[in-house]
Image: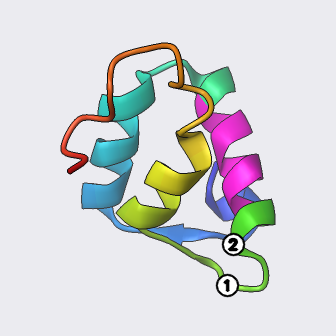
Amino acid sequence: MAKDKDLTISSDTVTFLIEQIGVNLTLIDSEFEKLAVALHPKKTVDKEAIKNTIRGLLKHQQPLKGAQ
């Protein structure tokens, strides 16, 4: 999915993303789309980008795991 959006992401960061939003593939694909737009022109997804991008998604849920 990240590759389809021309993004690179480490396995640790993929694990972090899944810990935050779960394994719903439609939701993961949607988040990669948001990340592609938010990061442009950069192509590398990191944990900080995920924290910043999915914050609104989790606004009414528990705080991000591992977020300080």
**In the shown orientation, is residue 19 left or right of residue 60?**
left
Q: Position of residue 46 (x, y in %)?
A: 42, 68
Residue 31 in magenta stretch? yes
Residue 66 is left or right of residue 19, and the answer is left
Q: Is residue 39 above or below residue 24?
A: below
Q: Quadrant of residue 19?
A: top left
Magenta segment main secondary structure: helix
The image shows residue 50 at horizontal and vertical percentages of 49, 53
Q: Residue at x 37, y 61 (%)?
A: 47
| Residues rendered magenta in the picture | 28-36
Please rate how many residues cluster around mark 1, counting C-alpha atoms within 10 Å: few if below 14, some from 14 to 19, many from 20. Answer: few
- SS state under label 1: loop
Coordinates of residue 4 in the picture (x, y in percent): 74, 58
Q: Say which residue label 1 marks.
A: 42
Query: Residue 28, image x and y in percent?
Result: 59, 34
Question: Which amino acid does the dot numbered 2 rest on?
Answer: Leu
- Of 30 and 48, nearer the camera is 48
**Mark 1 belongs to which amino acid?**
Lys
